[in-house]
Image: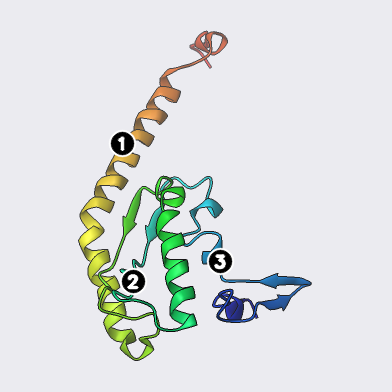
Amino acid sequence: MPLRASCSFPGLFVPIEYGGRLLLDGAIVSSVPVSALPDMDLIVAVHIRSSGLGRRPSSLFEVVGESFRITQSLNQASWRDRCDLVIEPEVADFRWDDFGRADELIAAGERAAREALPALRELLRQRTMAGIRKAQERRFTLPAASAQLDPLA
């Protein structure tokens, strides 16, 4: 049921009732739900950009879809600011329902991930160095009472 709810866009598909609640696609609230990760040391997000129809919508489905695309585009700052790295596969030539092109979509994601590896490695290096410095500061900063150790102990 929750999986079916993940494609319940208001105006396109009826919400699903589950556990006494009506469930909608999570993108209604947050297209990239990084707010669910408040205490992570490093957040790498994958964002699937849409350039839109490129023409005037010709059906109710297209109007609703474009409305969501515009809303998500305007709300990007709310999640981007929390990310350390955002990977955006090049998928402009795909439609949201190009299920028959899954292999090509996966390949686009793999390419984008490989291209992001240098940036990810640098982030990890920086975080590792910061962690080492923090550990060294803790190791060499002893409370005054601890500084008087018995040399025979």
Question: Residue 109, located in which quarter of the rendered image?
Answer: bottom left
Which quadrant, please, contains the N terminus? Answer: bottom right
* Left or right: 8, with 75 as reference point: right
Query: What residue sits 46% from the left and 68% below the top?
Result: 67
Q: Pointer 3: what residue?
A: 26
**Residue at 24% across / 58% down in the picture?**
117
Circle 2 sits on which residue?
52
Residue type for callout 3? Gly
Q: Is residue 38 left or right of residue 113?
A: right
In the rendered structure, which amino acid carries the disc numbered 1? Met
Q: Residues within 10 Å of mark 2 (few under 14, many from 20)?
A: some
Mark 1 sits on what residue? 129
Image position, residue 55 (x, y; %): 30, 76
Mark toward the start of the polypeptide (1 vs 2): 2
Mark nearer the N terminus (2 vs 3): 3
Tag 2 and tag 3, C-beta contact below 8 Å: no
Mark 1–mark 2 contact, CB under 8 Å? no
| Element type where label 2 sits in the image | loop
Q: Nearer the viewer, residue 109 or 97?
A: 97
